[in-house]
Amino acid sequence: MAALARPYTGPTSAERVGLTRWVTTLDHKEIGILYLVTTAVFLVLGGIEALLMRLQLAVPRAEVLGPQAYNALFTMHGTTMVFLVVMPMLLGFANYLVPLMIGARDMAFPRLNALSFWLLLFGGLVLYFGFLAGDAPDTGWFSYAPLTERPYSTGSGVDYWAIGLIVTSVGTIATAVNLLTTVVQLRAPGMTMLRLPIFVWMSLITALLILGAIPALTAAQVMLLFDRRLGTHFFDVGAGGDPVLWQHLFWYFGHPEVYIMVLPAFGMISEIIPVFSRKPLFGRPVVIASGMAIAFLSFLVWAHHMFTVGLGQISDAFFGATSMVIAIPTGIKVFSWLATMWGGRLRLTTAMLFAVGFVAMFTIGGLSGIHFAIVPIDWQTTDTYYVVAHMHYVLFGGTFFAILAATYYWFPKIAGRLLDERLGKWHFWLTFVGFNLTFFPMHLLGLMGMPRRVYTYPDLPGWGPLNLVETVGAFVMAASMLVLLWNLRESLRRGQPASANPWDAWTLEWATSSPPPAYNFETIPPIRSARPLTLTRRSALVPDPPLPQGETPSPPTPCPSGGEGAELASRDEAKLASPVVGMLSFIFSEATFFGALIVAYLDLATASPGGPRPSDLDVPRTALFSVALFASSATVSVAGRRLGRDDRHGFRLWLGATVVLGAAFLLGQASEYARLYAEGITIGRNLFTSAFFTLTGFHGAHVSVGVLALAGLLGLTLSQPSWLPRRAAVEAVSLYWHFVDAVWVAIFSIVYLRSLL
Amino acid sequence: MSEPQIQLPEASVWPLALAAGLTLTLFGVLTSPALSAAGTLLAAVALGGWIRELRHG
């Protein structure tokens, strides 16, 4: 056994009670539970919205809901399910499981982890505030422009939608930074990358997808809000704006988002099927590689959502081809699961039933997805119920079945009690039947031409009966969820206690008690393969039990590296400090954000019919204050080196120089804005000014944050001469500073130097 | 040789406060500048508390 350490449980959550425990917790397991409970509440809300829609559509020309209410319901249903249920529920599982699976005590940044959860909750509340205040968004979950522009959506629903999602997105990005850093930095000794459980691998790839995709949506939502609140013209057709830009940015986020919601589900299934087949996962390395391939390709397929826009034959051919290619790595995974089951000793527990159901339903959804890669078929079926059928086979029959499989599989670990298998099987079959009754007929209705997002429909042949079947199916699914809720309630109250490893599974989370103690592991087994618990059994070793109740743990000692981002599990081969890895991940997301703003600038800046134009900018003057910013990259590097040599005076001096140079740049930018405004060149004047002020303004905001952070650091070192910051923290702040400098190099070249050509 | 010691993070209210402050700041943009101001203040206090905890942690 490799002893990680004698743990100190201290005044952690276990010693706090009631609300205080939950609102102050930093324990990844408790935060994971908060995610799961919160998303379950949003699931109920999203489900009720779906049932109301199905009631309205049960028969032709029904009058349960008016068109406005129906529009609001389908908008809220889609937004809720994507942003407040599926994605955060998967992140909730990752939160709970990833540290346990890699032998860590917590996430790399426990406070950031808690912040992420609260941002999810508060973002969701902002979204639902608009809904409950009678100002619900009603423009669909992808909120196409120009419908979302002020003249066509006069209420505040779209604003609540955008702000609510921006808040949740910041939290999601923070979670991705945390997950990535945790997996890179906090793996237990012996847990090499190739030995990581597949769920961890898929969570890692998902984190990268989040960082590369979600900021594009955030940038688009910022532009939309600026159009609506500050009078810019990004998507304003009347002023020459480009509504198709919204579609590009949205789907650049939107298609990777599909894989953000699917890859962790692949990971869950890849854990569950081998355990209940009593065989290792077939083609494990290929499953990992196919996950990476899916992630890469997912950034090259977005325009298949836009074939009806008329992007041209070359574009259609490219995106059609990439959309077909992405089916290959996805298909590889399906074959891997089938080959794992083939010849295995199958145990058809409820978790396994849902996993098998996932494989079947997801395959149907995947196959109908390939149809949308064929441009003429897409033209015929787009915006029909065929799309609704496809997406629900992927996201409900696929991802949600996997979530349910994961619920039955990991509930014993989380709650310390087994779910009732008899009720579980009732739950599975009701879900399976209800799901197929609801969504399979949608394929037929879509091919018959029934459009999606209509609040009612004429009594055409076959439409009424098929819609009625769908509504019956939706209520069967609702009944199945009641069975699950009852099962959860009864199991929590009097379920059979779970042992540490009730399924004879092989991954590390099963090496500790159910539920795990606050410190996760007293000791961990030696990790010499991807299935560490197999080795444990062979060598007749069993995990040590947690410290008995009441036994005093060893007293606390300061963590050597201390503070946020400390290495909570011992790790020999760490090359970079956690704050540095975290900052690099964050910079990746920021690059996506600025990339989106730069694309918007390039698309719009020269499209204005009249002035002002880029040529109205004072390039030499801007070049002058740009020099200050570029020089500050050098001074912050020197400051870091002086800190490394323990040269306190030099560190303060060069840090101070960086602050002064950064402030000089900001003053220069402020004077440029003042000159432009004095000449009547304001943000809402035309397309160029919209794009210019938004791009340079956000850069200026980033520089301001950097100056404040550096000034704060300087203030602390001056007020307490004996104190110096950790090198890793300074290194991370320096990286951020270099990044804002690099962004300015791009902006200066694209906006200013290009105007001289 | 003594075993390495590991300290688990203690509970903290600052992440909740910072999230509330940031959300309130943005929510105020749609509703009232006073809410934005209160949110900014709350976020600043929370950030200060967070940094204090890290320094003394």
Image: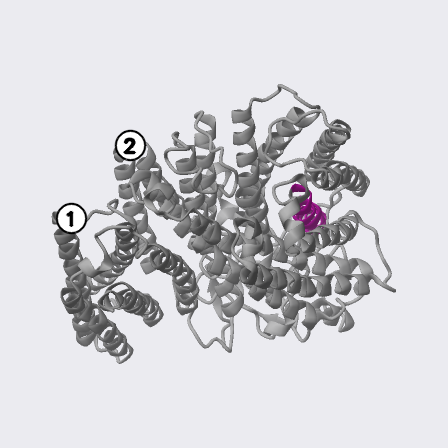
Instruction: Identify the main secondary structure in magenta.
Output: helix
Q: Establish if A650 lies above or below A347.
A: below
Q: Is residue A284 above or below residue A352?
A: below
Numbered tag placed on residue A677 in the rendering: 1
Asked if residue A400 lies in the magenta stretch, the reply is yes
Identity, as a three-letter code, of the amino acid under mark 2: Ser
Span shown in magenta: A388-410
For residue B23, side relative to residue A87 (left or right): left
Image quadrant for the N terminus of chain A? bottom right
Give the answer, above or below, for where A606 lies relative to A144: below
Residue at image point 33% right, 69% down: A735
Q: Residue at x 48, y 65 (%)?
A: A181
Viewer-proximal residue among A241 and A363: A241
The chain letter under disc 1 is A
Residue B41: percent from left, percent from top: 26, 42
Quadrant in which the C terminus of chain A appears: bottom left
Q: Residues within 10 Å of mark 2 (few under 14, many from 20)?
A: few
Residue farthest to the top, as pictured: A63
Does residue A605 appear to the left or right of A83 in the view shown?
A: left
Circle 1 Cα neighbour tier, 10 Å, few/some/many (<14 / 14–19 / ≥20): few
Q: Residue at x 74, y 43 (%)?
A: A419
Task: Judge if badges 1 and 2 mark residues of a common chain.
Answer: no
On the question of residue A446 being in view, the answer is yes
Using the image, name the chain to which the residue with label 2 belongs.
Answer: B
In the rendered structure, does residue A50 fall within the stretch colored magenta?
no
Which of the numbered marks, if any, corresponds to residue B32? 2
Q: Amino acid at mark 1?
A: Tyr
